[in-house]
Image (cartoon, helix red, strand yellow):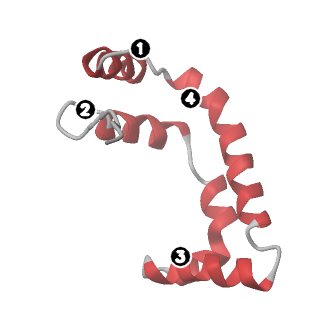
Amino acid sequence: KMTHDAMEKHVLEIIRNAKEDWIKKQLKTVVIRAINSELFNRDSSLDIVQELTEYVSAENWPAYFETEKILRGINVKQVHKRLLEMFTDKVLTIGVYKSL
């Protein structure tokens, strides 16, 4: 079992070592999976309403119709920049769930 500190060090090490070449290899697969997921989530009227509700709650319902274009537009530099922004010591929280 990993301790909290060991897990945090492990995650931060992975993020620091994430190179653009590695991200590029992962990005195509991730984008295709995300697009497929979006399409499957529009399989029935109930699914469509649920999806639209998410977009409306984010105050961006027109993006519903642009989702595939938006996902295909994500590039390696954007992902790399976001990784470095989101996984810093100041904004990363790693916790351990303990049942009562």
Amino acid carrying mark 3 in the image: Glu
- Residue tagged by mark 2? 88
- Residue tagged by mark 4? 23
At 30% from the left and 39% from the top, the residue drawn is 85
Label of residue 1 in the image: 1
- Judged from the image, the secondary structure of the residue bearing numbered disc 4 is helix
Label of residue 54 in the image: 3
Residue 17 or 44: which is nearer the viewer? 44
- Judged from the image, the secondary structure of the residue bearing numbered disc 3 is helix
- Mark 3 touches mark 1? (CB < 8 Å): no
Q: Residues within 10 Å of mark 1 (few under 14, many from 20)?
A: few
Residue 80, horizontal then vertical, whole percent: 44, 34
- Mark 4 touches mark 3? (CB < 8 Å): no
Whether 1 is drawn above or below 33: the answer is above
Q: Residues within 10 Å of mark 2 (few under 14, many from 20)?
A: few
At 58% from the left and 22% from the top, the residue drawn is 22
